[in-house]
Image: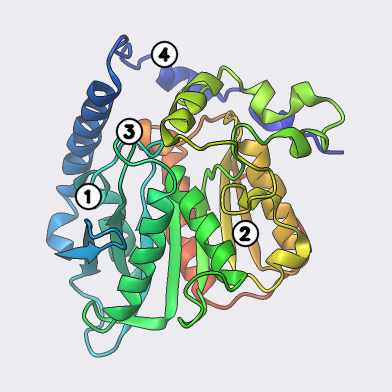
């Protein structure tokens, strides 16, 4: 039986910073909420880009989709990276509840990664709700991966060193795609994925929590219950985001929707995986249990916990002291997966 509730006590740093946060605007429509969120995220990214802009080269790309639409993508490369040979690639998918996020809102994150790791970063802007429902974003992830490999030389990348990763909703897309790819259901002709970076990933559909709940002696300590009213993403917010996807009759056995339910045999042989979770996040425990499954199945797994902090805290409150560690986990995690680490078989949660 599991119990990770010790990580759910709000941290002093969170209580201090959150007390100074502006009051959220209520009674906005879905579109108004998305517009406001994108505006705020782009403004923050623009400010963070000031010291980074001269350090990266950015190029825009258009990715065609299976339904004859197009996605905007942007690549980032450090100005002092090696231009004489192909570089590893980090394919990045943003968070935002499948509702918000733009190319520009992720410029600072992707530029920082490119500068600190000297890999090429490909930032993909998949399509969002409410206009695009399930499985559009999942298909966009697959189509983008195919496009990347078809254009890998053009962006100066090494096809044998492609790491995929994302935050929140983006991490769910990555986890789902990596599992489907591993099960030979998608992109079977492409080289193996070198690693995956899962930051606060949702891994189980909101209507499919039955089986995982049984793993807790006291269900009230399960994070979806303990953190039901958590800041940033509460259960009500999670429900609203999920409902916009319009998933009909979700099935617990559908691993495309629920990669968190993959068995040890299904994940054996997975690429090295970094999984970061937040203690005050209702998604905490599904991330930890997925990482536990991977580690015990012999997958090189690096697990990081941010005790007492809510979902995607670093995106919303960059002034938090733990944001530096969040960035370090992403940057160093990419390099760690590329180092071909050896599995330990031990599930270890790192808190610092």
Q: Between label 1 and label 3, give the one nearer the viewer.
A: 3
Task: Tell whether 23 sits left or right of 5.
Answer: left
Secondary structure of residue under mark 2: strand
Give how far apart the Cα atoms at labels 1 and 4 are.
30 Å
Residue drawn at x 23%, y 60% is 68
Q: Earlier in the sequence, mark 2 or mark 3?
A: 3
Give how far apart the Cα atoms at labels 2 and 1 are.
28 Å
Q: Which mark is residue 130?
A: 3
Give x and y (percent) for residue 157.
31, 80
| Residue matched to label 2 | 302
Q: Between label 2 and label 3, give the one nearer the viewer.
A: 3
Task: Tell whether 29 sits left or right of 162.
Answer: left
Front-lying residue, 78 or 106: 106
| Residue matched to label 1 | 103
Q: Earlier in the sequence, mark 1 or mark 3?
A: 1
| Residue matched to label 4 | 19
Q: Are marks 2 and 1 in contact (CB under 8 Å)?
A: no
Residue 39, quarter of picture: top left
């Amino acid at each position: 039986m599991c119990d990770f509730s010790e990580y759910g006590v709000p941290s002093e740093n969170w209580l201090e910073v959150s007390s100074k946060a502006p009051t959220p605007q209520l009674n906005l429509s879905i579109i108004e909420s998305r517009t406001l969120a994108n505006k705020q995220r782009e403004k923050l990214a623009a400010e963070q880009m000031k010291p980074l802009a001269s350090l990266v080269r950015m190029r825009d790309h258009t990715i065609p989709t299976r339904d004859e639409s197009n996605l905007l993508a942007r690549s980032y490369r450090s100005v002092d990276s090696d231009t004489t040979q192909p570089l590893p690639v980090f394919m990045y998918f943003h968070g935002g509840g499948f509702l918000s996020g733009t190319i520009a809102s992720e410029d600072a994150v992707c530029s920082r990664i490119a500068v600190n790791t000297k890999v090429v970063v490909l930032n993909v802007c998949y399509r969002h709700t409410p206009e695009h429902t399930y499985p559009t974003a999942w298909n966009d992830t697959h189509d983008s991966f195919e496009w990347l490999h078809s254009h890998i030389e053009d962006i100066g990348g090494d096809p044998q060193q492609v790491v995929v990763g994302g935050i929140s909703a983006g991490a769910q897309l990555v986890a789902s795609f990596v599992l489907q790819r591993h099960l030979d259901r998608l992109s079977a002709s492409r080289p193996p994925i070198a690693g995956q970076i899962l930051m606060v990933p949702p891994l189980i559909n909101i209507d499919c929590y039955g089986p995982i709940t049984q793993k807790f002696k006291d269900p009230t300590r399960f994070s979806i219950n303990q953190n039901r009213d958590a800041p940033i993403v509460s259960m009500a917010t999670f429900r609203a985001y999920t409902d916009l996807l319009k998933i009909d009759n979700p099935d617990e056995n559908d691993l495309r929707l629920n990669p968190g339910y993959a068995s040890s045999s299904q994940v054996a042989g997975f690429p090295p995986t970094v999984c970061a979770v937040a203690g005050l996040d209702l998604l905490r425990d599904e991330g930890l249990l997925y990482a536990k499954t991977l580690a015990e199945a012999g997958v090189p797994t690096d697990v990081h916990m941010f005790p007492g902090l809510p979902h995607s805290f670093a995106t919303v409150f960059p002034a938090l002291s733990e944001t530096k560690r969040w960035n370090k986990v992403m940057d160093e995690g990419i390099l760690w997966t590329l180092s071909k680490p050896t599995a330990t078989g031990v599930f270890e949660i790192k808190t610092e």
